[in-house]
Image (spheres, rainbow, N blue to C red):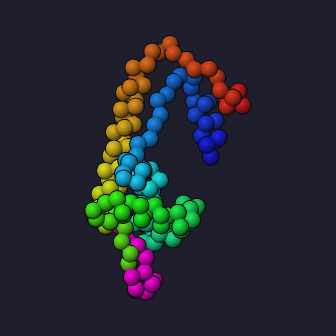
């Protein structure tokens, strides 16, 4: 996947482009980032950590570790277990989990605006060398 992105990005322009992602560090390292937020969204969509993990080609164990890490680093959990019922149980986002998603995407949009603003400051004559992807 990264090779495809690099190839696609390499062909867009010979002008420099500022790129970046934002994440929030916590006491255990990464607390919230792009992948964790997508996992939270999928848990909301599917009502299950197992189904959310499968939709992301991620092991249940890894998804559970990510959820557990987020929950341990907050005063109130982002994901709660749902017991019983017709389907046997599952998981649901809490209000704090929903708020975390909204805030993260706002921070991410604001960061992309910042990058575009800073990129505009680069000299127009600045050019990058052609990449291998450009010649393919």
Point out residue 46 in the picture as x, y percentages from the top left corner. Answer: 45, 69
Q: In the displayed structure, would residue 36 be above or below residue 50? A: above
Q: What's the residue at 58%, 61% (across, down)?
A: 57
Q: Is residue 10 left or right of residue 67?
A: right
Q: Where residue 93 appears, x then y in whole percent? A: 35, 67
Q: Where residue 108 appears, x then y in whole percent?
A: 38, 43
Tell me residue 102's x, y (percent): 32, 53
Give, as a single range, the part of the protein colored magenta: 83-93
Residue visible at 42% across and 51% down?
30
Residue 42 can be seen in this image: no
In the rendered image of this protein, does residue 21 appear above or below residue 84?
A: above
Can you tell which quarter of the image residue 87 is in?
A: bottom left
Which quadrant of the figure has residue 109? top left
Q: Is residue 82 above or below residue 40?
A: below
111 displayed left or right of 57: left
Q: Residue at x 67, y 31 (%)?
A: 133
Give the quarter of the figure containing the C terminus.
top right
Report the front residue among 36 and 119: 36
Residue 28 in view here: yes
Q: Nearer the viewer, residue 89 or 75?
A: 75
Q: Is residue 96 magenta?
A: no
Instruction: Identify the residue at image location x=42%, y=50%.
Output: 29
């Amino acid at each position: 996947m990264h090779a495809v992105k690099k190839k696609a990005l390499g062909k867009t322009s010979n002008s420099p482009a500022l790129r970046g992602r934002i994440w929030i560090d916590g006491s255990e390292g990464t607390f919230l980032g792009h992948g964790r937020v997508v996992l939270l969204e999928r848990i909301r969509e599917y009502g299950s950590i197992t189904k959310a993990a499968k939709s992301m080609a991620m092991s249940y164990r890894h998804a559970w570790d990510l959820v557990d890490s987020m929950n341990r680093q907050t005063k109130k959990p982002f994901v709660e277990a749902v017991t019983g019922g017709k389907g046997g149980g599952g998981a649901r986002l809490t209000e704090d989990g929903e708020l975390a998603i909204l805030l993260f995407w706002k921070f991410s949009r604001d960061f992309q605006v910042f990058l575009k603003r800073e990129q505009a400051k680069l000299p127009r004559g600045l050019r990058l060398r052609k990449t291998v992807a450009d010649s393919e």
